[in-house]
Structures are given as C-alpha cells and as structure tokens.
Image: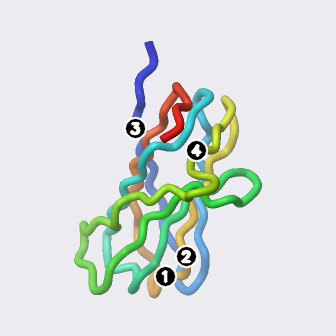
C-alpha cells in the first residue's frame, strides 16, 4: 500500500538569478509538503516554489531575513488555485528558487501523496 513519501533533493542556486531543479514524479501524486533548509543565507524573502509543467505555482516556501546556515524556510503554502494539481507518473515537478544574493546549497524535502487527495 502506498503512503505519502518524502524525497530529498539538493541543488545549488546561482547568484542574482532564478535557479531550477527538477524531480520526476515516481507515481501519480499531489504535492503535500515542501521543507527547505539552506547552507547559507540566500537573501531576504527569497522564495522556493513548486511548479507544474505549465509553470503554475503549486505552492511556496519563503525564507525570512538574516538566516543562519541550516535555517529553514517558512511553512509550505499551497496555492489556492493549483495547490491540488495531480501529477501523472513520470511528470516533471519543478523546484524554483528566486533571485539569491549568493550561490547557496538548498536541501529540499518534498512530500508526495500517491492518493492524490485534495485538501
């Protein structure tokens, strides 16, 4: 029986530009949660978004100001319109970080729901 599962993704952002990472859905699913921690301060109010193949925002995590290494972004906030988007097996799930003050390593823990339940 499938249960919501977490997957870990690590990627390095670029300085002064948008950075993207991609994850292939291992089964039909919806995104339930995203936890993001950073290796250094990415900058004030930078955002990590989960996007579908049409560039719709599924939800976001926003960093606060003056973060220390190992700090986490805020709680995952699903989008009111696209937050329950269902990904098919093999679809690409995009993680996008907005313009960072410096190149930092992000550790992203993505929770996927194989039941595609709406919340």
User: Label 2 belongs to which residue?
Assistant: 98
Query: Are the residues at dot 2 and dot 1 in contact (C-beta closer than 8 Å)?
Result: yes
**Spatial distance from mark 2 to mark 1, Cα to Cα?**
6 Å
User: Label 4 belongs to which residue?
Assistant: 84
Query: Are the residues at dot 3 and dot 2 in contact (C-beta closer than 8 Å)?
Result: no
Where is residue 17, by image quadrant?
bottom right
User: Label 1 belongs to which residue?
Assistant: 100
> Left of 92 or right of it: where is 54?
right
Q: Earlier in the sequence, mark 3 or mark 2?
A: 3
Q: Which mark's residue is nearer the viewer, 4 or 1?
A: 4
In the rendered image, the residue lying farthest to the right is 54
Query: Are the residues at dot 4 and dot 1 in contact (C-beta closer than 8 Å)?
Result: no
Q: Which mark's residue is nearer the viewer, 2 or 4?
A: 4
Residue at screen point 45% across, 50% down: 9
Q: Residues within 10 Å of mark 2 (few under 14, many from 20)?
A: many
Marking on residue 29: none
Q: Which mark's residue is nearer the viewer, 2 or 1?
A: 2
User: Label 3 belongs to which residue?
Assistant: 6
Q: Residues within 10 Å of mark 3 (few under 14, many from 20)?
A: some
**Spatial distance from mark 1 to mark 3, Cα to Cα?**
26 Å
Of residue 25 and residue 104, the one placed in the foreground of this image is: 25
């Amino acid at each position: 029986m499938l249960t919501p599962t977490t997957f870990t993704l690590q990627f390095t952002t670029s300085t002064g530009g948008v950075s993207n990472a991609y994850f292939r859905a291992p089964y039909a699913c919806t995104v339930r949660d995203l936890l993001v921690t950073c290796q250094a301060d990415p900058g004030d109010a930078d955002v990590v978004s989960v996007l579908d193949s049409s560039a719709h925002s599924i939800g976001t995590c926003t960093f606060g100001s003056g973060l220390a290494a190992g700090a986490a972004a805020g709680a995952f906030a699903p989008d009111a319109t696209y937050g329950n988007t269902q990904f098919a097996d093999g679809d690409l799930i995009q993680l996008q970080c907005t313009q960072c003050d410096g190149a930092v390593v992000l550790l992203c823990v993505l929770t996927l729901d194989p039941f595609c339940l709406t919340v």
